Amino acid sequence: MSRNRYDSERLTGSEIHFLKASISRRRFLLRTVCGGALTAFVPSAVSASPTNFRHAVRWITENFQEIRDLGAACRRKGASEIEAVSNLLNEHREMPDELLNTLSRRIKNDFANDRVVVIDGWVVTETEAAFCAYCAIVDPFEL
Amino acid sequence: MLIDYRQGSSPADIDTDLCIIGSGAAGITLAREFIDSGVSVVVLESGGMEYSEAAQDLSEGISAGLELEDWGANRLRLFGGTTYHWGGWCATFTEMDFENRSWVPHSGWPINKKTLAPYYMRARKILEINDRPDDEERLAEATKFSRQFNRDRVVPQLFDVNALRFGERFKTELEKSSGVRVFLNATAMELVPAPDGNKITSLKVGALSGKRGQVRARDYVLACGGIENARLLLLSNSVERKGIGNRNDLVGRYFMGHLLAETAYVASERPENNVELGSEFETSNGFKSLLGMRVGDAAQRNQEVLNSVGIFTSQHAPNEAMYAFKELKNAMQRGELPNETAGKVGKVLLGLDDILRAAYGKIIYRDVNRYLDKVWALSGMSEQQPNPESRVMLSDKQDTFGQMKVALDWRLTEMDRRTFQVMTKNVALELGRLGIGRMRLAEWIAKDTGWTPWLISSYGHHLGTTRMSDDPAEGVVDRHCRVHGLGNLHVAGGSTFPTGSALNPTFTIVALALRLADRLKQD
């Protein structure tokens, strides 16, 4: 799947600018984008339309090997929330607004309560670590 | 009056009321307080009005512990001293900086912030910085996210910024003063005490031209920096074999820098957040300010760490080729090969385009980072745990005068390292909670890789070597900065700091110099 298949008009203008500007950068900056994408891109994509969650995960899993690598690292560290997040994603897959709110709330609470892990240098919340781990194991064509 | 000590018209022997050794921020501040006071003052400056390699070489020393970054660049021997390259960051130390903290061995000043408060206000005028000291009021003018911090984790830390060059700013004033004589190219060589060791009777002075003489004064003040203050006391060993003020073997011990290092890189969640991450701003009354994030008092206490502050700076992206190139270059300058030489050469070859861009930027614009990819980095600045084993000593190598050069055994502790880790994590939690961005830790923070000398800097702040304490067994000077056991010898500058705070020292150095001037006037 090429990047052109990604339905970019469903992102906000600033997110498109952010991603496009960064995609052309070198490896570190690509990783940086992925870090930002965890909350900036994914929840926004999820919220944009009922189908966008699938687009988002497919796009991430196919084009951002870095996220999958991060997810693999999360799994090696034993991402404890992976089942909860997996259930959450499946439960809310047709209710993106609710999913977005729940994810955002969980992530914010994680930060507020020091529920973070360091994965490959990134300080990520347990919820995000589980999301990355989910991306690492999911088959995008079964979504 | 400015006098070149090398000239025949300058007397070799000088008599005065007060002799100040050093013309940096502390020395000039002190001298100005005595203009038109009726007290005759002599300021000795080892350098001249301009930078000279010959004078600067007198500051060279030998690293016996961690390699201290560029000795020459850190201490400037010329009129105005190291203010010629300071960044002008000013902030008052916190109340807790002065306290005895149970988790920080050897912490605690004999004075508190309240003692210094009036002198901080006077120092604001001298340093020409914002005279509105209300942080909360000024904070309202800073970026908005700073007001949303969970202050149990990090507190906003304001700096006033004005890199005042003391030499340029106060030259004319001192030149016109008849009561203050500044002798240039006059190096203090040895303090000579009375036979009973209770006071200083004279100071031996020399010029690189070969001229020798002495200064006889009623009072003497050392104001030549955290390394040279200790060195001159140790060199003054003709009567006291261990050096002056060193009966308890404390002179030169507890050497501290301000630790400075990049600890993390920031992925802002939206481009507009980059504006928020910018640290500098201008207040409504026209003063330049800067905002950092300091680990709050509660967090320091709860997590048993030192004071530290983080500042966002726009940096080039961490670049393995550049790091490998630096390691190869540093090793080759020492005539050695670094570990894993082949791997480092490979990284350099793979990243040759970055190296060429860095070289081009440096050659054309004197800016290595100009053409390298930029990211926001979190630069951490921390105080250092007072450690008696971290010390300034005399080496067996001699300078041009035949004086022993300094050997510096600079040591860091596990608490120093943990402080950086806690500061970085607390900032990461707040950036994430506020939806501003995410942080990727530098490898030395994320992993227990030990200290990497070329990643860490002392920030050129040299502190603690003549520390202040009411107990002669714990400090070299008392609360009035008078050397214990000597009636007429005082010390000014960062060498008197028992602990260093996370905040830049010059503001406090100037405040302490004003306090010392008042004390000397009373005497």
Image (cartoon, rainbow, N blue to C red):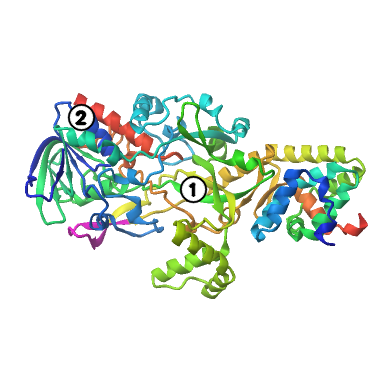
Specify the amino acid type for callout 1: Asp
Is residue A45 something that shows in the picture?
yes
Find disc 2 in the rendering and name its residue.
B34
* Rendered location of residue B266, percent (x, y): 62, 48
Is B396 magenta? The answer is yes
Number of numbered markers? 2
Residue B73 x/y as whole percent: 35, 53
The image shows residue B340, relative to residue B401, as above or below, that is below
Q: Would you name the residue on which mark 1 appears?
A: B416
- Residue at the location (51% across, 41% down)? B309
Looking at this view, name the residue that lies furthest to the front: B364
Q: Are marks 2 and 1 on the same chain?
A: yes
Q: Which mark is residue B204?
A: none
Query: Which element carries disc 1, helix, strand or loop?
Result: helix
Is residue B87 shown above or below B403? above
Q: In terms of sequence position, does the residue under pointer 2 or pointer 1 come before the other?
A: 2
